[in-house]
Image (spheres, rainbow, N blue to C red):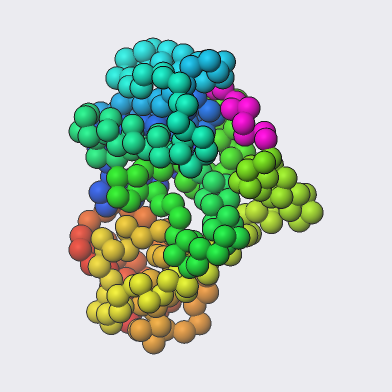
Amino acid sequence: MIRQTLSIEQRVLRDVRQLVHSPSRVLMAISGGVDSMVMAEILSQWQAGLGIEELTVAHVHHGLGNQFRDEALALVRQWAEQRKLRFLTNTAEALSDVNSEEELRLYRNRHLRQWSAECGADAVAYAHHRDDLLETRVLRLIRGSGKQGLTAMTLFRQGKFRPLLNLARTEIEDYALAKGLHWKMDPSNAVDDALRNWLRNQWLPALERKRPGAMKTLARSIETLLPQALGQEWPDIPYVGLRRELFISADVSERRELLARYLRAMGINGYGQTHIDEIVKRLRTRRKNFAFAMLGLKFTVSPDFLWASRV
């Protein structure tokens, strides 16, 4: 179990360290649920290793008179105080003018933007994970959002930081149990009236029972199709190589597509997904200058560029 928790922590470290510009002053949006408590635990425990200079805990209270919300507020406040982290929350006024999930989301975001500006944060950390991303993409497909809707969430873009994005919900829950963490379960998550809750609680689990591994396969299929759908968004791939900043700031699926297009531009055939994945893996580093050989090519990497030449 110790090995499993370390593996999850190391995966988060790996994902954040490969960012060209990782956040240094982070406001953590902590609801008190299992996902956000795991995120808070990992970011606080590995703060130095992640290059985070300052962590602030933020909890948006949705109003008085609700036992779950009051308990969640107390839990997050206590967690922050125990770790001597700055804690921010709002006045727990009754939200009589907030009547829907969308209005609650806007209410939360308004407070988080305000607090982020006040504490000089360069990112707000959200505990979204791989299952959240899949649910969002399926919802957008159902609603006919088009190809742009598939982009959904990213690890770090435009001040939004999602360090758990490559973890599955079951991995996060197993980690919380192994670490003995405390969290509060929002009772509204069990109500299937909302389409997202129905997808999460009914449809996706039924799909997984009918075809084990289907959720992972579906997520991977969307990742594979996404770059093709957005192909016109990318600049032309130059024969001379790829800008490293563009490559590293892209999502995993986008990196695969960029590499595939570059190899095609080089006139390289006969490569497979395993070759692409291996190259992506080797480029997952902050080393400034290095080289390696594959597919009869020598890949040379500098701080600004990566290019291939025939051996």
Q: Which residue is rendered at x = 68% and y = 40% of the image?
A: 192
On screen, residue 253 above or below 104: below
Looking at the picture, how far across and down is residue 71, in whole percent? 52, 15
Does residue 200 appear to the left or right of 290 in the view shown?
right
Residue farthest to the bottom, as pictured: 267
Q: Position of residue 36 (x, y in %)?
A: 47, 31
Nearer to us in this view, 298 or 138: 138
Q: Is 186 one of the magenta-colored residues? A: yes
Tell me if I can see residue 40 in this picture. Answer: no
Q: Residue 285's x, y, as percent?
A: 33, 53
Between 205 and 7, the residue placed more toward the observer is 205
Which residue occupies 36% across, 60% down?
A: 250
Residue 247 is one of the magenta-drawn residues: no
Specify the quadrant that holds the N terminus. Answer: top right
Q: Is residue 25 above or below residue 299?
A: above
| Residue placed most toward the observer, 122 or 52 | 122
Q: Residue furthest front?
A: 97
The residue shown at (31%, 26%) is 56
Task: Work out which residue is located at the far right of the displayed protein and give it.
Answer: 210
User: How far across and down, in percent of the image, does residue 248 sit?
Assistant: 32, 58
Residue 158 vs residue 291, the one in the foreground:
158
Region of the chain picked out in magenta, as a range = 183-191
Q: Is residue 55 above or below residue 11?
A: above
Q: Is residue 222 left or right of residue 40?
A: right
| Corner quadrant of residue 90 | top left
**Relative horizontal placement of residue 275, taking residue 283 as reference (left or right):** right
Q: Quadrant of the C terminus?
A: bottom left
Residue at image position (54%, 52%) is 136
